Amino acid sequence: MTEHTVRAFDEDLAFLTGRIQAMGALAERMVSSATEALIDRNVDLAQRVIADDPELDKLQREIEDFAIATIARRQPFAGDLREVVVALRITSDLERVGDLAKNIAKRTVEITPLYRLPRPVMGLQQMGDFATEQLRKVMDAYRTRTTAAAEEVWESDGELDAMEDSVFRDLLTFMMEEPRNIAFCPHLLFCAKNFERIGDHATNIAENVYYRVLGQNLPLERPRSAATPA
Amino acid sequence: MTEHTVRAFDEDLAFLTGRIQAMGALAERMVSSATEALIDRNVDLAQRVIADDPELDKLQREIEDFAIATIARRQPFAGDLREVVVALRITSDLERVGDLAKNIAKRTVEITPLYRLPRPVMGLQQMGDFATEQLRKVMDAYRTRTTAAAEEVWESDGELDAMEDSVFRDLLTFMMEEPRNIAFCPHLLFCAKNFERIGDHATNIAENVYYRVLGQNLPLERPRSAATPA
């Protein structure tokens, strides 16, 4: 492989990494805005999250196409190939994160007219903030290639599961106390589940940061609170 | 590229395709068993679905590792590279299908003691059967490289969304009628959502079959009933 080819691959890789960071920043903003919109009953902000999603999908397609073209053009192997494979995987997780944030935003639009602020909403805010933070940390770990930060994200995922259990129980109680709450509480259950899933995607990304840097996988079993059937 | 190299790639590809078919068959069985376990309140069968999941995860790792090694070893491009990329994507969708089936099975274990057969269960059976069938059809399309069958799966996804809306409404009514149903109905809401998500993964696979055969993407917007916030 010539010096010229090496530099060409590095340029491709820098472009790819930059696009993934842009995608991560957009996904993170969607999650934090979706949280804010849900808690503050801000339908306009929710609509903006929904409107952001096609941009995220476009970024994913662009990254995928570029990654595949890079493999075809540069024929990378070992660590170089790993970089591209990791890019493909992370872009797919970020696309899902955006879908989940969009789903929370759509539910916010739907339930805001029905909604009387229940206790469990505080738990939802906590979940949304935590998920946003996990995403921020893991994309930071991706940027700086820091496995310790990735492992930290991976290990904290159980906290989000525990929050979900608590929100879930509160919402069930809330529905049992007052049947009218059944009109919107199931949507809040799904919002809680979506935040928990966003955390799972942050965990997947953490696994990929680890694999990217060290060339090996984290152990198969991820930390998970025993109580959640997920 | 020598004749020998070409044949070596074809052998790798045949192995990869075979493993994906095995993975598809296992995922399909998990979905159909999870449906049966939920409807028949069969906790033993649900436990078997849960026990199947590590096997599916193992297959995914194996397929991923083999696909990446194939790219490194054979340096495929154009249609050959597409085959490997599609394999990577489909294995990831099938892994998620298994997770969703496992989640339904875990909920079945949890709610079976609380459960009195509600009307909406028929809708859930319909959803489970439909999702299983979508998966069977799309893996068939993968095996036979038939884009028409893949497009059919892609186009039918809206039916599953409509079923979910109907199950969702029935379950809300069921909870409003009788607060004790709130103990298990939310789990059934998530089961419905999971079946709907399994359909989405079948749709993703359909897109990949299309891309594999024709080298181009289906249009970005997938059919979706307007009513579902997903």
Image (tube, coloured by chain):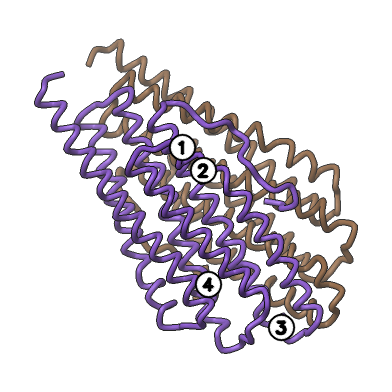
Chain colours: A brown, B purple
Q: Is residue A123 left or right of residue A131?
A: right
Question: Which structural element holds mark 2?
Answer: helix
Check the image and report above or below for B218 versus A47.
above
Q: Chain of mark 4?
A: A
Q: Name the residue rendered at 59%, 53% in the picture.
A: A198
Point out the image quarter for the N terminus of chain B: top left
Q: Amino acid at mark 4?
A: Pro
Q: Amino acid at mark 3?
A: Asn
x, y percentage for residue B207?
48, 38
**3D distance between C-alphas at marks 3 and 1:** 43 Å
Q: Which mark is residue B152?
A: 2
Q: Residue at x 46, y 26 (%)?
A: B216
Q: Which residue is mark 3?
A: B181
Q: Nearer the viewer, residue B108 or B40?
A: B40
Mark 2 neighbour density, 10 Å: few (under 14) some (14–19) many (20 or more): some
Q: Earlier in the sequence, mark 3 or mark 2?
A: 2
Left or right? Give the position of A146 relative to A201.
left
Tag 3: Cα neighbours inside 10 Å, few (<14), some, or many (≥20)?
A: some
Query: Which residue is under mark 1?
Result: B148
Looking at the image, which residue sits at the far top? A4
Is B68 above or below relative to A65? below
- Which chain hosts label 3? B
* Disc with the residue nearer the chain's start (3 vs 1): 1
Q: Secondary structure at mark 1?
A: helix
Q: Amino acid at mark 1?
A: Ala
